């Protein structure tokens, strides 16, 4: 399977009519977007705001971040099974508005988190301080259940990203990257002297605000399965997840999965990047046993020599991570794990809730309990009302001068467990 | 700004007094830098001055810890430095323990900032890494230049009250405290790099070492315990009264092997503990509380075990390096095997 | 499955569904963990992960854990390790003294309920 990603760089965003891309500027017609979102009867009102890198702006509570893309060639469309019809994606050509992101905000539950500061000390911890953000502020109808509300906000983000991506359909990309994964037998023949490498991605799958969807299927319901890695670039995996802002994977990160990209970068040189395996992190312990058995079995079936395993979340998934580590290692396959840490504010506690001796090669996304002081921002998109109640926030964390103290947990993408960021800990 | 005032602690060897034969020398003060202090002073440049050097023999220090420490602290206190640098001790075990002890005491008792340096396997590293900043050095004095080049910047930061980065950045041994840092490469790239190394069987360094399990897989159950020869082993420090083998009350460097043939009970006044990590009164009153010879004899008579092996092995687990403990066990386990001992009961405190 | 919970919403919902046994105790989060450990000591197996959910133990007040309905011979060491690790993890998160609004309270109940509920279909088909 071969996919060409064509990048159209976006250096700035402006409101404008009609929505279009000109000279690296994305012009956004807010009315069009509102109309698009308001087609969903669950939404009572929608607003669109813009936030650019370097501005004195805080976006909170952030639910999801999505990258505008469009499929210009090849089967299927963006976000198959949710926005587009179900069709296997990951081949052909896809255009990307690189540098733009759709950010959804709005309260779903009363302890919601997710902070993106576009400038100041908080900005270096979130990758989305560097993107030009189109922020959607959604209010649901009063009687709407949180489940339905989550779906409405999730869909609004995806649809808006697809709408904006559509603007890139007929543009000429400035740069093009090509990614190709051969079918099993051909790959083995072409790279017969290289070690065989796979990527196991663990997906949040625990319940409301803890879910992930694969081609529209709730990941709780899947058995571990195999993907061509390029499928995720077309939105095969989307986030329905908004607890634990620091280490959940927004849809944007699934689309740009850095492990997939960095494995492709050395594919055919240091190893043969054969396949991606996705598995889940269910609450029911027998599900964990089954999923980790299957994950190890698929690794063995693909004759892999090495595997990178990424976690999503803390606590319950630590157990899945260690089960995967143990069972894959038992197959004689070498592993590297990616996780983050909850070592306490002073860093002196045990970082993970589970451990196993096979986990001897671990990359850390940093200690999520580290406290950071964020200065007052000139403008808040969304509401700061929840900052005191979010993970790693305190009631009395708001100082008279407007500065707030939070743990990194509260910052979107701060301790990415797929290694999207540069933070680590020792 | 005034120059940072530094006191340097070194042993007899680095002071060029002599080797092992001179290790008995008591603490001594000399004005200005001595030996490696010259390199330290050069690295500090104009910012700091080594006002004096405390020299102490390694044997003297370790055999007279309290007295030596009192004398050394008094010397340091009189000169009111901003900083104490100890060593670096590289892989010299007793020197490492002395450096760690002096640095920790200077820091805790005198409020003087302190830095030392050791090779990661120096027993002093295990004992003091959580308490003082120990720069990770090579295992011999050939690593002096590297060590100094990392001890000096860290020491300056400590004195100036600047933020201390993560262990990997500053070069100190991990203190069991996780500190965040920004890496040059993103996490995914680091994971791929680590995997490539692992695939090639090259050395790699995990960013999060799993808690030290060092778990031993349990042996299958003893088939006929009522016929088995069972030995007692303890890290609770139970020794014949007077501690004939001079097992240290902490960070033990040896173990003892004691004959309990025919003994029914460990009597007060004949047996006691050498352990310095817990209140010894109950153990001294009745050492069976730690090393249950009396109960084992009862089981032996009831036929619940075959017999109690006539030697018991004892050491002190108080801060004793895991490596030392392993070495002790590897040593005495030979005898256990030779004597057909089938089970061991290991008691701690 | 026997549900140990301190969540009033679980008490209501699970009582209506009547598919599982229910032990509702209006106690603290930690006490639910300790209660689960008591059952594990008596030979029950954990069926759901005691640290389910990304809502940290010092944020939410509610915890629901599914265990086997009856004890079996011998202690399940995997269950014991999991519950002990969960208790240790709980203690690592410093208690947070803060006001819980009625809205937050009901949201915490709801999320805990959906986490537990996610185990139901598996629990009904899995041999206990």
Image (cartoon, coloured by chain):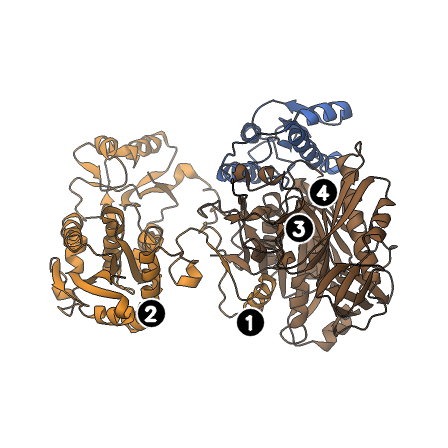
Chain colours: A brown, B orange, C blue
- Return the disc, 3 or 4, that comes first in the chain's sequence: 4
Which residue matches tag 4? Answer: A106
- Return the disc, 2 or 1, that comes first in the chain's sequence: 2
What is the C-alpha distance between the residues marked 3 and 1?
Answer: 26 Å
What is the C-alpha distance between the residues marked 3 and 4?
Answer: 35 Å
Which residue matches tag 2? Answer: B149
In this view of the protein, which residue sits in the foreground, A227 or A150? A150
Q: Position of residue A259 (x, y in %)?
A: 65, 63
Marks 4, 1 in one chain: no
Nearer to us: label 4 or label 1: 4
What is the C-alpha distance between the residues marked 2 and 4?
Answer: 52 Å
Disc 4: host chain: A
Task: Specify the label residue B111 is tagged with.
Answer: none
Which residue matches tag 1? Answer: B200
In this view of the protein, which residue sits in the foreground, B81 or B223? B81
Rendered image quadrant of residue A131 = bottom right
Task: Specify the label residue A292 is tagged with.
Answer: 3
What is the C-alpha distance between the residues marked 3 and 2?
Answer: 47 Å
| Residue beneath the point at 16% across and 54% down | B72
Q: Is residue A379 above or below residue B32?
A: above
Total number of numbered discs in the rendering: 4
In this view of the protein, which residue sits in the foreground, C27 or B303? C27
Disc 2: host chain: B
Q: Position of residue A196 (x, y in %)?
A: 66, 69
What is the C-alpha distance between the residues marked 2 and 1?
Answer: 32 Å
Secondary structure found at label 3: helix
Taking the image as shown, residue A387 lies to the left or right of residue A44, namely left
């Amino acid at each position: 399977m071969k996919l060409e990603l064509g990048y159209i760089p976006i250096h700035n965003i402006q409101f404008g009519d009609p929505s279009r891309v000109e000279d690296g500027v994305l012009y956004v017609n807010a009315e069009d977007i509102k109309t698009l979102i308001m087609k969903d009867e669950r939404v009572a009102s929608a607003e669109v705001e813009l936030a650019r890198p370097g501005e004195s702006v805080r976006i909170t509570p952030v639910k999801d971040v999505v990258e505008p893309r469009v499929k210009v060639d090849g089967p299927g469309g963006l976000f198959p099974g949710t926005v587009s019809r179900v069709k296997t994606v990951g081949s052909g050509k896809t255009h990307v508005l690189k540098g733009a992101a759709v950010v959804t905000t709005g309260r779903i539950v009363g302890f919601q988190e997710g902070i993106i500061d576009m400038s100041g000390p908080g900005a270096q911890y979130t990758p989305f301080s560097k993107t030009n953000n189109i922020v959607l502020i959604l209010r649901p109808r009063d009687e709407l259940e949180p489940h339905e509300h989550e779906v409405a906000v999730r869909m609004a983000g995806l649809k808006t990203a697809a709408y904006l991506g559509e603007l890139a359909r007929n543009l000429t990309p400035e740069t093009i990257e090509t990614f190709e994964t051969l079918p099993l037998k051909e790959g083995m023949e072409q790279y017969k002297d290289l070690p065989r490498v796979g990527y196991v991605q663990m997906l949040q799958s625990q319940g409301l605000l803890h879910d992930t969807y694969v081609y529209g299927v709730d990941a709780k319901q899947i058995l571990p399965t195999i993907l061509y890695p390029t499928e995720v670039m077309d939105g095969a995996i989307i986030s329905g997840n908004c607890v634990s802002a620091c280490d959940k994977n927004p849809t944007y990160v699934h689309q740009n999965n850095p492990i997939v990209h960095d494995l492709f970068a050395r594919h055919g040189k240091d190893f043969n990047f054969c396949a991606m395996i996705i598995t889940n992190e269910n609450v029911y312990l027998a599900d964990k046993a089954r999923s980790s058995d299957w994950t190890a079995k698929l690794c063995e079936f693909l004759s892999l020599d090495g595997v990178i395993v990424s976690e999503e979340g803390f606590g319950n998934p630590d157990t899945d991570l260690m089960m995967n580590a143990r069972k894959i290692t038992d197959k004689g396959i070498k592993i590297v794990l990616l996780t983050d840490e909850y070592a306490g504010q002073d860093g002196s506690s045990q970082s993970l809730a589970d451990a196993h001796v096979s986990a001897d090669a671990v990359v850390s996304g940093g200690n999520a309990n580290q406290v950071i002081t964020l200065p007052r921002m000139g403008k808040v998109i969304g509401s700061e009302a929840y900052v005191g109640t979010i993970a790693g926030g305190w009631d009395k964390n708001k100082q008279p001068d407007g500065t707030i103290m939070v743990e990194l947990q509260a910052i979107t993408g701060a301790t990415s467990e797929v290694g999207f960021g540069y933070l680590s800990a020792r | 700004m005034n120059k940072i005032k530094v006191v340097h602690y070194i042993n007899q060897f680095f002071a060029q007094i002599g080797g092992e034969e001179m290790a008995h020398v008591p603490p001594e003060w000399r004005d200005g830098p001595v030996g490696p202090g010259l390199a330290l002073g050069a690295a500090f440049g104009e910012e700091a001055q080594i006002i004096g050097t405390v020299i102490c023999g390694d044997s003297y220090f370790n055999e007279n810890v309290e007295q030596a420490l009192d004398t050394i602290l008094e010397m340091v206190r009189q000169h009111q430095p901003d900083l104490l640098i100890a060593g670096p001790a590289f892989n010299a075990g007793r020197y490492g323990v002395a450096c760690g002890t002096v640095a920790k005491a200077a820091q805790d008792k005198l409020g003087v900032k302190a830095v030392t340096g050791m090779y990661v396997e120096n027993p002093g590293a295990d004992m003091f890494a959580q308490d003082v900043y120990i720069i990770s050095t090579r295992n011999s004095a050939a690593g002096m230049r590297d060590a100094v080049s990392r001890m000096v910047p860290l020491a300056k930061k400590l004195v100036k009250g600047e933020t201390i980065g993560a262990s990997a950045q500053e070069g100190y041994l991990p203190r069991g405290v996780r500190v965040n840092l920004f890496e040059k490469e993103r996490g995914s790239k680091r994971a791929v790099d680590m995997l490539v190394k692992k695939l090639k069987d090259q050395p790699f360094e995990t960013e999060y070492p799993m808690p030290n399990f060092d778990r031993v897989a349990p042996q299958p159950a003893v088939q006929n315990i009522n016929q088995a020869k069972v030995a007692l082993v303890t890290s609770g420090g139970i020794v014949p009264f007077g501690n004939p083998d001079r097992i240290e009350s902490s960070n033990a460097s040896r173990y003892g092997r004691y004959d309990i043939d025919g003994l029914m009970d460990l009597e007060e006044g004949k047996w006691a503990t050498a352990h310095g990590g817990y209140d010894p009164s109950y153990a001294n009153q009745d050492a069976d509380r730690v090393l249950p010879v009396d109960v084992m004899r009862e089981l032996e008579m009831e036929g619940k075990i075959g017999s109690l092996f006539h030697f018991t092995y004892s050491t002190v687990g108080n801060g004793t390096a895991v490596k030392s403990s392993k070495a002790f066990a590897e040593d005495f386990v030979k005898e256990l095997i030779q004597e057909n001992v089938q089970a061991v009961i290991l008691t701690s405190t | 499955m026997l549900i140990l919970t301190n969540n009033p919403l679980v008490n209501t919902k699970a009582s209506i569904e009547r598919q599982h046994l229910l032990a509702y105790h209006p106690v603290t989060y930690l006490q639910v963990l300790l209660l689960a450990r008591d059952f594990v000591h008596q030979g029950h197996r954990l069926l759901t992960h005691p640290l389910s959910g990304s809502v940290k133990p010092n944020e939410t007040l509610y915890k629901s854990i599914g265990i086997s309905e009856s004890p079996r011979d011998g202690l399940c060491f995997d269950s014991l390790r999991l519950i002990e690790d969960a208790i240790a993890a709980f203690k690592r998160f410093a208690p947070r003294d803060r006001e819980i609004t009625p809205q937050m309270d009901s949201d915490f109940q709801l999320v805990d309920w959906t986490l537990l509920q996610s185990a139901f279909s598996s629990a009904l088909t899995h041999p206990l």
